[in-house]
Image (cartoon, rainbow, N blue to C red):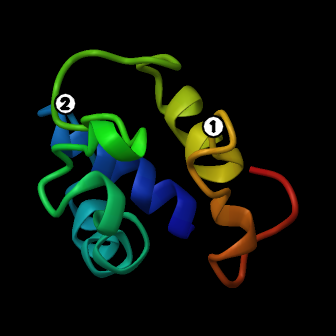
Amino acid sequence: MQIEDLTQYVLALSRRETDEAAVLRAIPLFSQQCASCHGIAGEGAPLLGAPDLSDQIWIYGPTPGAIRAQIWHGADDRGPPRKARISGQATTP
């Protein structure tokens, strides 16, 4: 459920239609797990290789499934996979 909530939060950052309850649940998790690289507003950090999550440019795809996969698995050995850091998750997305 945390991965799905974070997926909805990322969609909200780019002003897309979302599940508002999931977005609210994800705020503390994003702050704890993602904001240090992606920024509190999802603005990204190019020097760290953390993409801007608030624009309409999708490096790995704009679908909820593509976003969920990136959160779950990480990307290019830069983004740490959440499956290793978020408790209570199964072994697949």
Residue 22 in which image quadrant: bottom left
Residue found at x 42% / y 38%:
49
Number of numbered discs on residues: 2
Front residue of this view, candidates 90 and 47: 47
| Identity of the residue furthest to the front in this view | 47
Distance Cα–Cα, label 2 vs label 1: 22 Å
Query: In the rendering, at what x and y percent does residue 6 appear?
Result: 42, 58
Query: In the rendering, at what x and y percent does residue 63 appear?
Result: 46, 22
Q: How crowded is mark 2: few (under 14 residues within 10 Å), some or many (20 or more)?
A: few
Decide which of tag 2 and tag 1 comes sooner along the chain: 2
In this rendering, would 72 be left or right of 58?
right
Q: Say what amino acid the circle numbered 1 marks.
A: Ala
Q: Say what amino acid the circle numbered 2 marks.
A: Arg
Residue 16 image label:
2
Residue 75 image label:
1
Disc 2 secondary structure class: loop
> Mark 2, mark 1: which one is toward the viewer?
1
